[in-house]
Image (spheres, rainbow, N blue to C red):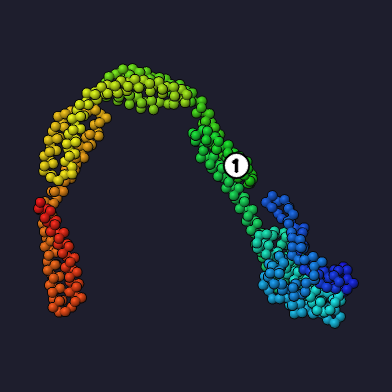
Amino acid sequence: MDTNVPATYTQHDDRRSSPASSVVDGSPAPLVAAADLTSDLTVVTDSSEPVKAPVPTPSEVASTSASPVPTPSVLIAPSPSAMPAAAAVTPNRPRNVPRDFGRIDELGNAFLRTPEGEVPIGQWAAGTVEEGFDFFGVKYDDLFVEIDLARQRLHDGRGTVDQAATVLAHVRASLITPIFMGDITVLTQACDNVDALLEEARQTEQDRRKALRERAREQRELIAAEAETLADSTQWKATGERFAALLDLWKAAPRIERGAEQAMWQRFSAARTTFDKARRTYFSQRDVLRKEAISAKEALIQQATELGTSTDWAGTTREFRHLMDRWKAAPNAGRKIEDSLWKRFRAAQDVFFAARDAANAERDAEFQANLEKKLALVSEAEELLPVTNVPAAKKAMRGISERWEGIGFVPRANRDQIEGRLRKVEDAIRTQDQEAWSRSNPETVARASDTAAKFREAFAKAQKKRDAARVAGDAKAAADAQDTMDSIETFIAAAEGAVAESKR
């Protein structure tokens, strides 16, 4: 059929219609979703495998043909609450009034007004002229819903570039051979908008693929860089496990350009080889080092055994400290052997330290009598607290100290405690002595006296001011002066108290 010949629509027509509408029994059929026209579209994924795109069925947008036939007003300007899913995305636009954009003459010939002039779009013979306007208006609405749904899906990211391009091609083809009545300028602009969005979407897809490649490159670069940082590690077990994990990550990472990937793999492989070579060298040398460690520690055990019978408690204790330092500096002989050697070394030390502790216990028994005497002196000293008479306390403390020095040593376990108690009494007396000196210091007394004199002078001035206010009958000024006197009087009492205290 020649597409340039306008179609004729009659009661006996074979139900030809636009892709989104039809005529049944002389009445316009319900609006059909534009998405029905994209059932063969595909979505291109990162794997370049074409996948069938899910598209809504006509029931998702409009009712079935068995539903009541909607009126033109429902098709053109539905309310938001009653709008089907496809029409709900239609932007605000003037209500489509087909009569404003075309005409049907008395012979049923239908024309569309375009900026270039009238264009014949078909012939209406299926009903009244008003029904013809409604018919061609619904076709315009169908096309507008199609293109706007494509725009909205592109904008929301729910549609693919290929889907939108198919819809755009269909609507532009309808603009070339129109069979609708509506604002062709608005529909053309809607197509241009989708065209612009398509260009942006194509660019976005290119950028996304580029970003994926960059991320894959960065991932492999990170793996290679981390491997290089591990090449000189001596944490053999942990680093070996990490290299195995990095190898798994390398195998799972997306592929990149062959040359770049090969260069990164060479870096990764070289780092792993360096680590493996060092690990093998370490374990091959470890047995030699352990033999040397066993020999060195056997010698230390022999020396510790020889020192075990010494009675030079202080000197031998220092020798054992030196042996311990050499033990720590010697190489490790391996966990099992190391534990066995350490037990023998510790047993040799224990012989000496047990003998030393026994000797100290015997000596401490001799010092027990001295402890009893010093405890009595500490109790005598503590009776001086709290210090109320500094000169008397100082004199008593001198006598206690002289007797303390004449008693002699006490057991080591009690020495720090008993000396601490005596030192506490000495500190308390010393503190009171210093405070007494500070109070009797001539400079301190002079400052306190001068302060008291200044307060008394200020008190006299406030008193004169109060008396003058009373004579003048100024009750407020007199009250203020009295408040000042009361405050100054408090300061005078404090200053005079300080002067009296310093003279004691």
Q: Nearer the viewer, residue 192 or 128?
A: 128
169 in relation to 407, above or below: below
The three-letter amino acid code for the residue at tag 1 is Leu
The quarter of the displayed image where residue 19 is located: bottom right
Please tell me which residue is depicted at 68% across the width and 67% down the height of the picture. 89
Q: Which residue is more in the foreground, 169 or 88?
A: 88
Name above or below for residue 64 compared with residue 98: above
Query: Residue placed at 53% from the left, 31% from the top?
Result: 277
Whether residue 111 is visible to the viewer of this picture, yes or no, is no
- Please give left or right for residue 497 compared with residue 173 in the image: left
The residue under label 1 is 249
Identity of the residue drawn at 79% across and 69% down = 30
Residue 40 lies, with reference to residue 112, above or below; the image says above
Image quarter of residue 119: bottom right
Residue 160: percent from left, percent from top: 70, 58
Count of numbered circles on the image:
1
Q: Where is residue 54 in the image (x, y as percent from the top left)?
A: 73, 57
Horizontal and vertical percent position of residue 230 = 51, 38
